[in-house]
Image: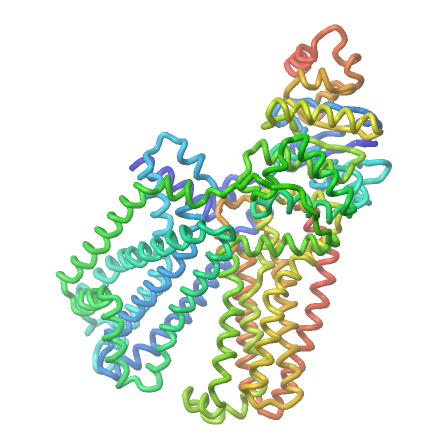
Amino acid sequence: MNKLWILLRVQMMGLLGINKVVHSNDKKEKRKFIRFTILMIFVAISVLFTLVMYDFMFADVFSKAGVPELMPALMMAAASLVTMITTVYKVNGLLVGFRDFDMTMAMPVKTHVVATSRLLVLYIMNLGFCLLINIPAGIVYTFFAVPKPSFHAMIFAAPPPTFYPFMIILTLFVPMIPMLIGATIGIIITAMASRFRHANIINIIITLMLTLAFMTASFESPAIFTNPYQTSKTIMDSVYGIYPLTRMYTQAVCGGSMVSMILFVAISAVLLAAFSVILSLFFKWLNTSFTTSRTRSNYRMTSLRASSALGALYKRELRRYFSSVLYVMNTGFGMVMALIMCVALLFFKPDQLEEMLELPGFAETLGALPPMLLAVFVSLSCTTSCAISLEGKSLWIIKSLPVEAIRIFHSKILVNLTITVPASLICALLMSLAIPMNAIQILFTFVTPVMFAVLSALLGLFLNLLYPNFSWTSETTVIKQSLPMFLSVVGGMMVSIGLLVGLMYLPSSLQTAGLAAVTLAAAVIDFVLYRLLQTKGARLFHAL
Amino acid sequence: MLKIENFSKSYKVRKRAVDGLNLTVKAGDIFGFIGHNGAGKTTTIRAIAGVLDFEDGDIFVDGLSIRRDPVACKQRLAYIPDNPDLYDYLTGIQYLNYIGDVYGIGKAEREADIKKYADAFELTPSLGDLISAYSHGMKQKLAVISALIHHPKLLILDEPFVGLDPKAAHTLKEIMRELCSQGGAIFFSTHVLDVAEKLCNKVAIIKGGRLVAYGNLADVKGDQSLEDVFMELIDHE
């Protein structure tokens, strides 16, 4: 137990970066950490606020349909789904193929302790999600748990007295089963992919297909808002059918059933313990057979293909991008979603969309929206915000090359634009076929997202130069949990969504002018950021 | 070929990792840079290679300042760190071709040199494999080949013999001598004093960021062995 705690503590120190700050004499580093913490609190509050809004929306619908308990059940199912999907991505790097495997396994610690410590880190990471989703959902539920929703009901007429203790206890167990399902899928994907020479590409394709399948299944939910009374029952049945533990959760938390509560805890704990044992048995094998590169050792010198310096830097950067499943999934998925959405649009007429979304007059305002909608997806696909940090311990190579910093920046920006621009142009073409637009609107549908793509790439790179991290042991740290990534993706998304909503509220006659202003502003910011990269960016790069 | 003038570097405000370093490496020199752990060897080497930014003093490569003209300096030198972390997602040949492209080496010349050095280090059969599958020694060999294919005038090596098998170490020493006989220069750090004694014509000993001995090998060691001189300087200076 003591050794488990030691291993867990070291991993958590690396994950959160607190230790580095506590023991660092660098004031700059400390200031950066404080800024990061403040921003993370702001992000958490924003996410919490959005979730509570959703909770109220769902609870209102379900309460009117007479099934208020469906709201916490649905949120618990959502938390489980998020846990499962994110675990699939995290397996490679956390459970298998982690950097300090050799060092950790050489220590006088039993294999099952090492495996359990890795599993616990995964659990702690997922528990955060579950707490953030489940607890507010439970609190909002108490507001609606009576026929006449009120704050009074939250305190005096709340559900069973066991509600809060049961909810808190069960939330601790909610991530366990989805986590082990996700881990199993992740291990299978890694195993399958390792059989092929281009393992990462296979891994990316399988993970992408799987995520799309989950997304398609969850697209059913908008039906709740269009016809809550008929669909609530159907949704309840399907959620309970797909994941029976949701029913147990509802019975325990909302119904106060001790039997369901014990069953939930027992099933989750036993399955996780069993998984932990199985994982321990195969831990060494998993980490050596799937992650060991196959060698042919039969190379013969052949003719080489020469490129320009920029071409070489770009090709290397592109290979880096596709070498990481997590990197591709985290930054490329937005554009895949945009493409799917645009293809789907071809099958709907604008008036059908208006009817489906129950937004009268929506079709008339539609013309000015595609450019900003694409800009939202483009903002989700920022690869540059971790491109510098991902150099990691190989940073010395680009720093010792006889090329100017800006050329290195170009290669990183070009990779980002390779991911966003072609997809964005295809989307623009599909949208201009699906949605009635005038010539100017079509022009903006092509131009505006490209301006935002450049903006996102430049901003991401500048932020990463300001906040680099080269001491990571798992790519997850810089790809998913870094300040530049948060700032560029969350900030970019908030700005583009804000502009999208702003344009929607403008009178139709002013929308095109508004769009022109936004596009021009984006172009000006692009120019300023590029100049900034040439000067301050280059200085920051030399100081790395 | 290499001139270091009053070079200082501080990581923290109070302590200087390197303090007022001055030295010169001429064409044809094999210069050994010796010091114990934390003495300032790697800091100096990284600054020469243009990897580490610094504010005090200057470093000149072939007469050009690394601070004012870093790209031209880097074109003339090659650097191999003590633990060459290369790109795991590239194959050996992809990495060498990448270096060839960035340094603008002609196709025919590049192919001939890769073959020459890869054969010398017995790495040719493995060039098609991913670098992630390489052992530490193989990575070291690949880094050395990548440094040699662009014909540097100045070769900067940080502990080059760590991880190399005896045959590869011998090959590297031969190549170092060949490069210097052709007018190049080598500046390398080492803990292995025997190697320095056999290979170098000049040495410098650094302690706490300051030079404590510097000059021709024969002048520095006198009648003693280099190890004795080193121990004496480190213990008593």
In terms of depth relative to the viewer, which is nearer, B189 or B149? B149
In the image, residue A333 above or below residue A89? below
Determine which quarter of the picture holds residue A235.
bottom left
Image coords of residue B89 (percent x, y) = 56, 48
Determine which quarter of the picture holds residue A223.
bottom left
> Which residue is painted at 31% across and 64% down in the image?
A135
Q: How is the image coloured?
A: rainbow
Question: Would residue A495 be seen by someone viewing this image from the given angle?
Answer: yes
> Which residue is painted at 49% across and 75% down in the image?
A340
Image coords of residue A99 (percent x, y) = 48, 42
Residue extending farthest to the right is B63
In the image, residue B234 above or below residue A175? above
Question: Would residue A543 be seen by someone viewing this image from the given angle?
Answer: no
Image coords of residue A62 (percent x, y) = 27, 80
In the image, residue A378 above or below residue A24? below
In terms of depth relative to the viewer, which is nearer, A303 or A475? A303
Q: Is residue A398 left or right of residue B201?
A: left
Q: Is residue A9 left or right of residue A297?
A: left
In the image, residue A542 above or below residue B119? below
In terms of depth relative to the viewer, which is nearer, A389 or B117? B117
Q: Quadrant of the N terminus of chain A?
A: top left
Image coords of residue A515 (percent x, y) = 63, 82
Disc count in the image? Answer: 0
Determine which quarter of the picture holds residue A249.
bottom left
Residue extending farthest to the top is B223
Q: Is residue B58 left or right of residue A437?
A: right
> Which residue is painted at 71% across and 20% down in the image?
B205
Q: Is residue A443 left or right of residue A118?
A: right
